[in-house]
Image (cartoon, grey):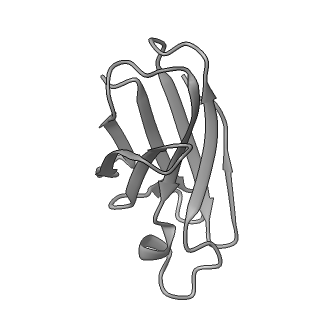
Amino acid sequence: MSLVTTHVLDTSAGKPAAGISVRFERQDGTVLAEGKTDDDGRIRDLGPDTLEPGVYRLVFDTGSYLGPDAFFPDVTIAFRIVDGTSHHHVPVLLSPFAYSTYRGS
Protein backbone atom coordinates (compact mmCIF):
# COMPACT_ATOMS: atom_id res chain seq x y z
CA MET A 1 0.00 0.00 0.00
CA SER A 2 1.25 3.49 -0.78
CA LEU A 3 1.97 6.03 1.92
CA VAL A 4 -1.03 8.19 0.88
CA THR A 5 -4.49 6.78 0.12
CA THR A 6 -7.91 8.34 -0.29
CA HIS A 7 -11.58 7.43 -0.33
CA VAL A 8 -14.48 9.52 -1.68
CA LEU A 9 -18.04 8.91 -0.54
CA ASP A 10 -21.01 10.57 -2.23
CA THR A 11 -23.15 11.46 0.79
CA SER A 12 -26.11 12.62 -1.31
CA ALA A 13 -26.33 9.29 -3.13
CA GLY A 14 -25.23 7.19 -0.17
CA LYS A 15 -22.54 5.36 -2.15
CA PRO A 16 -18.86 5.48 -3.07
CA ALA A 17 -17.89 8.06 -5.68
CA ALA A 18 -16.28 6.03 -8.48
CA GLY A 19 -14.26 7.50 -11.34
CA ILE A 20 -13.01 10.73 -9.73
CA SER A 21 -9.58 11.76 -11.00
CA VAL A 22 -7.14 12.70 -8.22
CA ARG A 23 -3.71 14.34 -8.41
CA PHE A 24 -1.20 14.01 -5.58
CA GLU A 25 1.15 17.02 -5.50
CA ARG A 26 3.91 18.61 -3.50
CA GLN A 27 3.14 22.07 -2.15
CA ASP A 28 5.06 23.59 -5.09
CA GLY A 29 2.66 21.92 -7.56
CA THR A 30 4.97 19.08 -8.64
CA VAL A 31 2.72 16.13 -9.48
CA LEU A 32 3.81 12.96 -7.68
CA ALA A 33 1.01 10.64 -8.81
CA GLU A 34 -2.42 10.54 -10.43
CA GLY A 35 -5.24 8.07 -10.20
CA LYS A 36 -9.01 7.50 -10.32
CA THR A 37 -11.25 6.28 -7.58
CA ASP A 38 -12.32 2.66 -8.07
CA ASP A 39 -15.83 1.22 -7.75
CA ASP A 40 -15.46 1.48 -3.95
CA GLY A 41 -14.46 5.17 -4.23
CA ARG A 42 -10.87 4.39 -3.20
CA ILE A 43 -7.37 4.94 -4.49
CA ARG A 44 -5.06 2.53 -2.71
CA ASP A 45 -1.89 3.05 -4.74
CA LEU A 46 -1.41 6.81 -4.89
CA GLY A 47 2.19 7.82 -4.58
CA PRO A 48 5.38 6.38 -3.18
CA ASP A 49 6.02 4.24 -0.11
CA THR A 50 8.02 7.02 1.60
CA LEU A 51 8.00 10.82 1.42
CA GLU A 52 10.01 13.69 2.80
CA PRO A 53 8.23 15.56 5.60
CA GLY A 54 6.36 18.56 4.22
CA VAL A 55 3.07 19.88 2.91
CA TYR A 56 1.30 17.97 0.15
CA ARG A 57 -2.00 18.30 -1.72
CA LEU A 58 -4.66 16.05 -3.12
CA VAL A 59 -6.67 17.65 -5.93
CA PHE A 60 -10.00 15.96 -6.72
CA ASP A 61 -11.73 16.62 -10.07
CA THR A 62 -15.20 16.70 -8.54
CA GLY A 63 -16.68 18.60 -11.50
CA SER A 64 -16.42 15.59 -13.77
CA TYR A 65 -18.32 13.54 -11.18
CA LEU A 66 -20.91 16.14 -10.10
CA GLY A 67 -21.53 17.54 -13.59
CA PRO A 68 -21.09 20.87 -15.38
CA ASP A 69 -23.06 22.87 -12.79
CA ALA A 70 -20.97 21.59 -9.86
CA PHE A 71 -20.62 24.25 -7.17
CA PHE A 72 -17.17 22.82 -6.33
CA PRO A 73 -15.58 21.87 -9.68
CA ASP A 74 -12.53 20.68 -7.79
CA VAL A 75 -11.56 20.06 -4.20
CA THR A 76 -7.99 20.69 -3.04
CA ILE A 77 -6.92 19.34 0.32
CA ALA A 78 -3.53 20.37 1.71
CA PHE A 79 -2.06 18.32 4.54
CA ARG A 80 1.23 17.98 6.36
CA ILE A 81 3.30 14.81 6.51
CA VAL A 82 5.57 14.77 9.54
CA ASP A 83 6.48 11.07 9.48
CA GLY A 84 7.41 10.17 5.91
CA THR A 85 7.07 6.44 6.61
CA SER A 86 3.61 6.46 8.26
CA HIS A 87 0.41 5.76 6.30
CA HIS A 88 -1.79 8.81 5.63
CA HIS A 89 -5.42 8.25 4.61
CA VAL A 90 -7.37 11.32 3.47
CA PRO A 91 -11.09 10.60 2.98
CA VAL A 92 -13.57 13.01 1.39
CA LEU A 93 -17.31 13.15 2.02
CA LEU A 94 -18.85 14.82 -1.03
CA SER A 95 -22.25 16.25 -1.90
CA PRO A 96 -23.36 18.78 -4.55
CA PHE A 97 -22.94 21.80 -2.25
CA ALA A 98 -20.53 20.64 0.44
CA TYR A 99 -17.53 18.49 1.22
CA SER A 100 -15.62 17.53 4.34
CA THR A 101 -12.45 15.65 5.12
CA TYR A 102 -10.46 14.29 8.04
CA ARG A 103 -7.36 12.21 8.72
CA GLY A 104 -8.49 8.63 8.36
CA SER A 105 -6.82 5.42 9.34
Point 40% across, 54% down: residue: 22
Residue 11, x across and y down, in percent? 59, 58
Q: Residue at x 54, y 36 (%)?
A: 90
In the picture provided, is 6 more to the left or to the right than 40?
right
Q: Position of residue 88 (x, y in %)?
A: 51, 25
Q: How many marks?
A: 0
Q: Which image quarter holds the N terminus? A: top left
Q: Nearer the viewer, residue 98 or 84?
A: 84
Q: Residue at x 46, y 45 (%)?
A: 25
Residue 51 visible in this rendered orientation of the protein: yes
Front position in the image: 8 or 25: 25
Q: Is residue 96 above or below residue 86?
A: below
Considering depth in this image, is 47 or 36 the residue closer to the camera?
47
Instruction: Specify the farthest residue to the front.
Output: 28
**Residue 57 in the image: above or below residue 83:** below
Image position, residue 44 (x, y; %): 32, 34
Which quarter of the rendering shows the C terminus? top right
- Residue 17 to residue 90: above or below: below
Q: Residue at x 58, y 80 (%)?
A: 70
Res. 11 visible in picture: no
